[in-house]
Image (cartoon, helix red, strand yellow):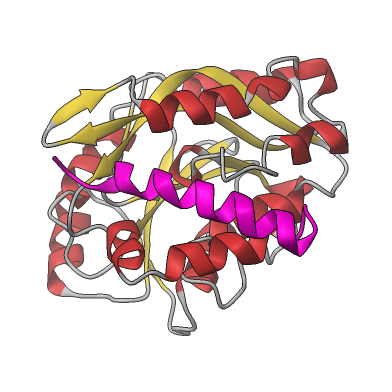
Amino acid sequence: MNDIHTFVVLAYKESLFLECCIKSVLDQSLKTNVVIATSTPNDFITKLAKKYKLDIIVNKERKGIGYDFDFAVNAANTKLVTVAHQDDIYDHTYAEEVVNAYKEQKESIIIFPDYYEIRNGENVYKNTNLKIKKFLLRPLKNHKKANKKSKKRKVLKYGDAISCPSVTFVKKNVPKEIFACDLKCNIDWYAWEKLSKREGYFYYINKPLMGHRIYGGSTTTEIINDNKRTQEDYFILCKFWPKWIAKIIAKVYSLSEKSNNVK
């Protein structure tokens, strides 16, 4: 056990990919702490926890997904915490790269790398959605200027360029309530907008170090199909733009939702 980094695997109900996620965070070049957090304890999660000798921390207050994320962040007592999404995987050097970034800039708020998509069992490193996000993140490539409020907000004003499962939080530089809100899909974009106004750095590691799984049963896909995504996009964009501009960008941004379809 160390006092630097923890993966908190956020488990919900019975994900077919939870074990893959657990294996990936245990198989790190830099050994780190791993625990499971859940608001839906069940035999499936318990069996996997026992198999891999992991503690389970139960959130008894089921207020919503944003509150589950905050619970997960606060479940760790280390300097850094990554909320590992149960459907995703983390590359062998993820923790090592993040810790090295922290040692370089300890006043970071969040540290995050690029990511790739997992579609039908295949790793996808290039598509329209990934190219757009990488383009939007360009202002953060210069780490010395990544503490400027204008730079942090510039990467968010056209859409959510920061992938939630890729993010590691520097606990001393973030509040206890990061995600708390009534949103369903854009809880992460909401969080980054709030954190962008704080003193500190958005440390961007310009290489893919984790895989985000895209499939029909994911929470994101369900929300997109329910048309809640577009409504929430507009709500967040209004934090950056006048309403009439936000409405135009939201309409354009909604086209990217098609990339979440598995083909």
Q: Is residue 103 on the magenta stretch?
A: no
Q: Name the one closer to the observer, 29 or 242.
A: 242
Q: In this view, does 134 lie to the left or right of 23?
A: right
Q: Which of 2 and 254 is in front in this view?
A: 254
Q: Tell me where residue 167 sits by quadrant.
A: top right
Q: Residue at x 85, y 35 (%)?
A: 150
Q: Foreground: 32 or 165?
A: 165
Is 135 rendered above or below residue 260?
A: above
Q: How many marks?
A: 0
Counting from the top left corner in percent of width and height, residue 94 is at 44, 25
In the image, what residue occupies the spot 78% across and 54% down? 241
* Horizontal and vertical percent position of residue 53: 24, 50
Percent across and percent down for residue 105 are 76, 23
Q: Quadrant of residue 115?
A: top left
**The C terminus appears in which quarter of the rendering?**
top left
Q: How far across and how far down the image is residue 189, in percent? A: 60, 53
In the rendered image of this protein, does residue 63 appear above or below residue 180?
below
Range covered by the magenta-colored residues: 239-263
Apparent side of residue 88 relative to residue 251 in the rendered image (left or right): left
Residue 159 visible in the current orientation: yes
